[in-house]
Amino acid sequence: MAIATRSAFGALVNEDAVHRRLYTDSNIFAEEMRRIFGRTWVFIGHESEVPNPGDFKTGDLAGQPTIMVRHANGEIHVLFNRCRHRGAMVCAHATGNASYFQCPYHAWVYKTNGDLALVPNVELFGSDFQLADWGLVHVPRVDSYGGFVFASLSPEGISLDEHLGRAKHYIDVMVGRAPFGAIQATQALRYEYPGNWKFQIENMSDNYHATYVHASAFGVRADMGQNGAAHVFGNAPNNQEQARIERSFGHGHGVLDYQGTRLLVTEPDRYPAYFAALRERRGEARARELARTDLHVMIYPNLILHTNYNHYRVIRPLAVDHTEINTYPCRLVGAPDEVNEALVAASALHVSPAGRVQVDDLEAFSRVQRGLAVEAAEWVLFKMRGVDEHVNEYGELECRFLSEMIPRGYYREWLRLMSQE
Ligand code: FES
Ligand SMILES: [Fe+2]
């Protein structure tokens, strides 16, 4: 697709390569915050992170601080974390439980639905000053699917339903692996890397690197044998890669489907009580399919689902060369404790700051960032073509491993969003 005429950004994105400036130019980063994170649906948090009234989580949307909070009536609100008086952030904790948010500066007090409840010396603010006019501002649009809460800074635009499209099917699969049909997030595993935010979403759809970057980690797995702790490592021999499927679909989303080529924590015969609970509610065939599901789902721009180790990963861009990642290992609600303990352990083993796999990727990201300082080589390549690329019955572009088809989808969406005024 020749797109050089579509916008100034068009000159930076080709069908199978993008310009290094996408990763190094802080002006482009600022435009990404405005045009991508400031416009499309962005993942904020999962409802299970705030299970009880008053539970909150702070974060940001396109660099603007936010609070996701469950109100007394059970509703979840996403509010801007900005006092209506002189602008202080009213809450500086990452997570917690609060009956009210009290601004630290002059002690204005807000309810957990954002309403302004109390102003010291309110009589000095004039007779027309109404508390009802000065609540915390709500993020323009908030919606959720399968407990995953998304927000958009744009008051208008396509619905979350339309934005997610086929991604809803993969959320259903992740949630459906729980006997009771729900996941429960646990404590976040948090780390930062000195590199651009797009490296993480590229990496999760990249099965080219794993053999090389993770050679030592996979060596450890091999030493564990197939029956001991190895199942929490869950990777298969390379000769099965041809069975694996990649799919790219609307709005930049994509999925890697490992098609039963890796060992899973939830193998039907590993934890019979889990499988029995799943079978009881879903039937034998569907239960087997769900237990054997192994997906990386990339929900553009900032959410990744990993059904094998059962976590979701959230990308938080901080600067053009600085990114924070929060990974939330999840329990399968209704599954026996031993299964959930193994799933949380598997996530921690892979993607915690002291884990054995993601640390390799982080080293790669920081080297890419440093390498891209070279101006003489301008293009970053996504040329790999998978076998048998075609559009499947669900409208997804599909091929067999290995390919760089899914990132090509990211950059089509990147350009589409960046080109809109
Ligand atoms: S800035 Fe919050 S009360 Fe003054
Ligand atoms: Fe990796």
Image: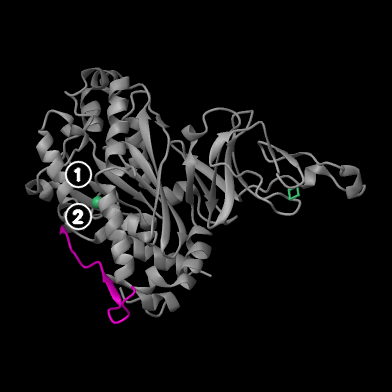
Examine the image and state in which quarter residue 76 appears.
Answer: top right
Q: Is residue 97 visible?
A: yes
Q: Earlier in the sequence, mark 1 or mark 2?
A: 2
User: Compared with residue 201, is residue 70 higher up or lower down, i.e. above or below?
Assistant: above
Whether residue 196 is in magenta: the answer is no
Determine which of the numbered discs, if any, sits on residue 213 in the image. Answer: 2
* Chief SS of the magenta region: loop
The Cα atoms of the two marked residues, 1 and 2, are separated by 19 Å
Coloration mode: one colour
* Callout 1 secondary element: loop
- The x, y position of residue 414, in whole percent, is 40, 64
For label 2, the SS is helix
Specify start and end residues of the magenta stretch as a single range.
Answer: 373-387
Disc 2 residue: CB within 8 Å of ligand 2:
yes
Residue drawn at point x = 38 percent, y = 68 percent: 23
- Magenta stretch: includes residue 379: yes
Q: Residue at x 19, y 49 (%)?
A: 245
For the residue carrying disc 2, how many other residues have a C-alpha within 10 Å: few (<14), some (14-19), or many (20+)? some
Residue type pointed to by label 2? Val
138 or 186, nearer to the observer: 186
Q: Judge by depth and name the residue closer to the eye, 165 or 417.
A: 417
Q: Which mark is residue 171?
A: none
Residue 137 image offset from top left, x and y in percent: 67, 48
The residue singled out by tag 1 in the image is 258
Looking at this view, name the residue that lies furthest to the front: 354
Relative placement, left or right, of 206 versus 83 is: left
Left or right: where 385 falls relative to 100: left
